[in-house]
Image: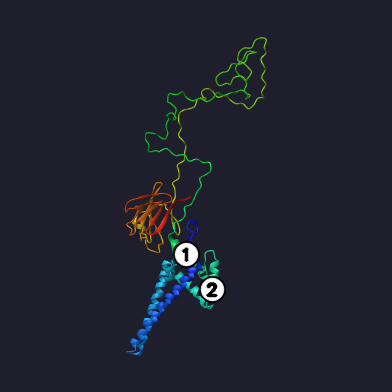
Amino acid sequence: MSANSPQSTPVYATIGSRIGAYFLDVLLFGLVYALGFGLAFLGFMLGMRGSDSTAVFLMSLLYVVPLLAYGVYVVYVGGVKGYTPGKQILGLRVVDAMTGQPLGVWRFILRNIVLGLIGNLTCGIGWIVLAVVANNDPRRQGWHDRAVNSVVIPASELNRPAPQSQTDPAAGVAKVPLLDSSNKSRPLHSDAAPLGISPTSPPLTPPPLSTQGLGIPNTSPTPPGQIPATKPGVVGPPPGMTTSTPSSAQTPPVPTPVQPGPAVQAASSADSEIDEATRMAARQASKAPTWVLVPAFGIEHVVAEQVLVGRDPDASLVEGSTAWVVQDAEKTVSKTHALVGTDGDALWVEDWNSTNGVLVRRGDTEIEASAGEKTFLEMGDIILLGDFEVKVRIHG
């Protein structure tokens, strides 16, 4: 379980299932003990035909060997694979609380030593208190778990797909489809006329600009008593005024003087026309996406170069590649299972002649990756390396 991977938050095993697994382990140990005792008794009876030392030797040998073999087996599978026989039956795993990996042999032994001391030194009362403490803990950790920083989880959590992060698009931002640069018949930047306008149509011109009311003095001389006629780019007289020369009997209304405002230069006729030439947009090159591989349980991996994935991959097989070790307790992942890399902005996976193959799950569709061929991936795809699932997402 990675502290930096919110997608991989596991469900912890219940106290009842853990107690059940413990009693199953005790029962199985009792069966092995009974078998060893039976073999020891048989050896003692057979040894009685010879000397007493032979009888004692056979009894000790046949008594110790089964118990020793069972103890070595329990320690090995517990440290390397994360379960005891009882936990294997009930589908539980003991893993590191931070990485989700098995504890290793020595940490597993220390965990069980602490558990044994808690019960044996208190005549079993410590185990009852331990169960209460673990049940009230957010991660159901007992004192023996805290001693080695371990947690107990269902085995199904190891291959649970990480939920896809949901990102809401920015409000009020419309998605604009980009033109296909592969379409040679329609260039991305062209000086052709806009759609729906004939190339022979007259050029579009802006509406005439008005200088009335802007405080701009009229520079063209006008005879006294005559209203200036309208010209292109100048708005006509206000309502109630005519452009004809008034008679001597009529006095034209004097317009209200306007206080001079900020000086504004009228647009020249040369600037009033729209430049039809399309200018190149000054866009910045889009940043290449950062692809991330998110395992169902464990630490995610950023694909910065070609990556060989497996239980024990050999990075020297591909020059310039790195190795990403995944922990698969069921061993359905080959030692060197797949090769993952990028071509530009695209991510791909290639089967490395693995035993169980590589399968890409995209929604309801499943794509089988072939050995020696690149299968390109998309955001949200799930890569199945045997039974081990890895989700594809883009960082950020």
Q: From the top left corner, tell me how far across and down residue 43 is, in percent.
A: 35, 84
Residue 22 appears anywhere in the view: yes
Label 2 and label 1: CA atoms lie apart by: 20 Å
Numbered disc 1: secondary structure: strand
Residue at 55% of width from left, 72% of height from top? 129
**Where is mark 2, residue-wise?**
128
Q: From the top left corner, tell me how far across and down residue 222 is, in percent.
A: 62, 15
- Residue 330 versus residue 41 in the image, above or below: above
Residue at 32% of width from left, 51% of height from top? 373
Q: Nearer the viewer, residue 30 or 72?
A: 30
Q: Amino acid at mark 2?
A: Ile
Numbered disc 2: secondary structure: helix
Q: How many residues crowd mark 1 within 10 Å: few (<14), some (14–19), many (20+)?
A: many
Q: Amino acid at mark 1?
A: Ile
As drawn, the residue found furthest toward the top would be 248
- Residue 320 versus residue 251 in the image, above or below: below
Q: From the top left corner, tell me how far across and down residue 203 is, in percent.
A: 47, 24
**Where is mark 1, residue-wise?**
153
